[in-house]
Amino acid sequence: MKIKTVGIIGTGTMGLGMAHVFAQAGRNVVAVKATPGSTEKAEATLAGGFSRLVDRGKMEASERDAILDRVTVTTDEGAVADCELVVESIIEDIATKKALFERLEDICTPEALLTSNTSTLSVTAMMAVCKHRGRVAGLHFFNPAPVMKLVEIIHAFETTDTTLQVLDEFCKDIGKDPVIVQDTTGFIVNRLLTPYMLNAIRMLERGTGTIESIDQAMKLGAGLPMGPFELADYIGLDVVEAMSSNIFEDVRSEHHAPPHTLTRLRQLGYLGRKTKKGFYDYSQKPPVQNPDLAHPFA
Ligand SMILES: NC(=O)c1ccc[n+]([C@@H]2O[C@H](COP(=O)([O-])OP(=O)(O)OC[C@H]3O[C@@H](n4cnc5c(N)ncnc54)[C@H](O)[C@@H]3O)[C@@H](O)[C@H]2O)c1
């Protein structure tokens, strides 16, 4: 089965990142903005990403224009009806995602592959609301999608071997390196990375170090490209909190529960880079650590 047209539901960080990847790899893309309002911002963000490549001499303007011609951004979910593959990338909330899968069952053909870009939620729970379950799987990209090579293909309870094989070939065809992972909370990467970020936040709350010193220690001492706070801000603190809550819900170990500081920042709407403030304040150049978090307050 050749996947020529891909539907994406959700035009946030990941939805637009995947739209960039699929369109650049020659696929037609139907990107659905899942919340009400104009599609202008999403279109401008997508075009801006390609224009930066043109400005840096990495792409011809004509190639950018051809790629953007392959992308339709809409608010109409029904527009994904003829897609061979749909990837949902809406908020990390199981009830919202299950309701979407129920609607996609009615909108899409029975052969279309229905997938989720969830970071930690059960793909099997989404599969459970579908009639044609063998075509449901996870397709978990990493941020920034155009740069990160890994895709975790999630093997949910009744995903067929054919579905896994088609997704594996598709990922390789668009230049990614997929791994097939069983449907367990957090899969491989987030199951290891989430507790690491939570431990760093608890370390900050205990006063072991500052945001900057902990980040610097992990970059210089462990050879990581970003420290845990830079990483959390990059992922988005709402997403990190949701990943923590989902793993906690599954394993019921206090160790995995969202730390106080993470929840407070999310409650204040400080979600990291996407809101210009999180553990760091990005309105400053270079960013400085959020002054409200200078003292441990757990
Ligand atoms: N941020 C990451 O690093 C990352 C990486 C891999 C996977 N993911 C997953 O991708 C998905 C999207 O995350 P993101 O980082 O793009 O988030 P985002 O906040 O950038 O985008 C969220 C999207 O959900 C939509 N949305 C908000 N409320 C909604 C509602 N009530 N109903 C339907 N849609 C709603 C928004 O319009 C937006 O398109 C999540 O499942 C997340 O776990 C995130």
Image (cartoon, rainbow, N blue to C red):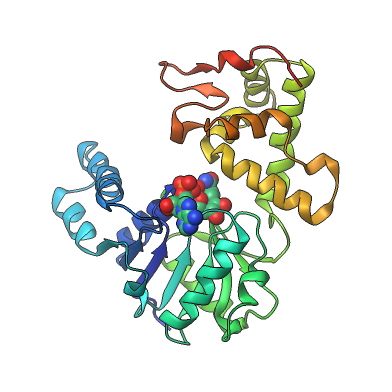
Residue that lies at the very extreme toward the right in this rendered image = 253
Residue 127 image offset from top left, x and y in percent: 62, 75
- 106 displayed left or right of 212: left
Residue drawn at point x = 62 percent, y = 82 percent: 161
Query: Eyeballing the image, is 237 above or below 41?
Result: above
Residue at 65% x, 55% y is 120
Q: Is residue 85 left or right of residue 124?
A: left
Relative height, residue 235 to residue 17 (above, below) = above
x then y, percent, for residue 140: 55, 59
Q: Indicate left or right for 101 with 259 as reference.
A: left
Q: Is residue 161 above or below residue 66?
A: below
Measuring 60% from the left and 63% from the top, which residue is drawn there?
A: 95
Image quadrant where one finds the C terminus: top right
Is residue 225 in view? no
> Which quadrant is home to the N terminus?
bottom left
At 73% from the left and 17% from the top, the residue drawn is 297
User: Compared to 294, does 180 lie above or below?
Assistant: below
- Between residues 208 and 247, which one lies in front from this camera angle? 247
Q: How many numbered marks does the figure carry? A: 0
Instruction: Give coordinates of residue 113: x percent, y percent.
Output: 49, 77
From the top left corner, tell me how far across and down residue 269 is, in percent: 52, 33
